[in-house]
Amino acid sequence: MVTLLLRSLRLHRNRPRGLRLAVDLPLRSGSHGTRPLYPDHIPTTSLQKILLAAGSAGMALYNPYRHDMVAVLGETTGCHTLKFLRDQMKKDPEGAQILQARPRISLSTLDLSKLRSLPEGSLGREYLRFLDVNRVSPDTRAPTRFVDDEELAYVIQRYREVHDMLHTLLGMPTNMLGEVVVKWFEAVQTGLPMCILGALFGPIRLRAQNLQVLLSELIPWAIQNGRRAPCVLNLYYERRWEQPLTALREELCISPPPKHIQGQA
């Protein structure tokens, strides 16, 4: 699986050399120990980031549903990759608008009654259905704290808040198998060390039957879609609620999951 993922990661001449599974250094060496750069920011030294990364990685592997630990791991290991993703967004017209407007996805910003009134099969209606069926809320996403750059802090916050949108696009639920599949898609799409670790180590918690389905069907499917689709951070989802989900999948070159797996992974 390691070789398969390494071959599938998007490489770019502007991307940092190598696959940074080790802890990345903060972008601003002089930022730690100073005033916070944004709400909830906690300035930290390089050593503190290493300790946070190690501790959060251990806890996340022990309990993958500790989303707070997964969040800390993402922030303390992904600064260089976040810079690359930020640059990708700046190059895209829709992505640049997102960086400028900095929309947020939460219960306070979503018009739930409007989403419920949208036609069946629309992105907004299917996203709301995903939230209802899986009993999840967009408000469970932790605020960014350990990224020492305000713009990059928004990039990782945006990544977290569109995570459920990716579940909707891919037709994956929130059980362990579904989460692993989404992590493989995200790993190929973003190259974030947190996603790579989740993709590689998440399968160890699966039952033998689910593991066989993952290896034979779902990982190849997630990799193929991750490679074909443009950067999913460049989609202004809030302006696409009325777009049919099937049309959006076609636009992004995302094929639906196998019929016998869709919605019950």
Image: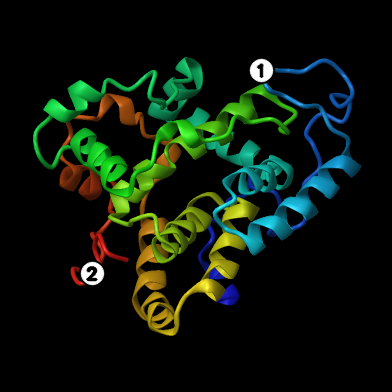
**Left or right: residue 234 compared with residue 113:** right
Q: Earlier in the sequence, mark 2 or mark 1?
A: 1
Vertical position of residue 247 compared to residue 172: above or below: above
- Res 22 → quadrant: bottom right
Disc sitting over residue 39 in the figure: 1
- Res 200 → quadrant: bottom right
**Left or right: residue 239 compared with residue 200:** left
Vertical position of residue 2 compared to residue 262: above or below: below
Between 20 and 160, the one lying in front of the other is 160
Residue at x-position 36% and y-position 51%: 229
* Pointer 1 local density, CA inside 10 Å: few below 14, some 14–19, many at least 20: few
The colour scheme used here is rainbow
Q: Quadrant of the C terminus?
A: bottom left
Residue 196 location, x and y as percent?
A: 59, 60
The residue to which callout 2 is attached is 258
Residue 233 location, x and y as percent?
A: 44, 37
- Res 261 → quadrant: bottom left
The residue mark sitting in front, 2 or 1, is: 1
Vertical position of residue 42 compared to residue 52: above or below: above
Residue at x-position 42% and y-position 34%: 138
**Mark 2 belongs to which amino acid?**
Pro
Residue 257 location, x and y as percent?
A: 26, 64
Residue at x-position 38% and y-position 83%: 209
Query: Is residue 4 something one can see in this rendering?
Result: no
**Mark 1 belongs to which amino acid?**
Pro
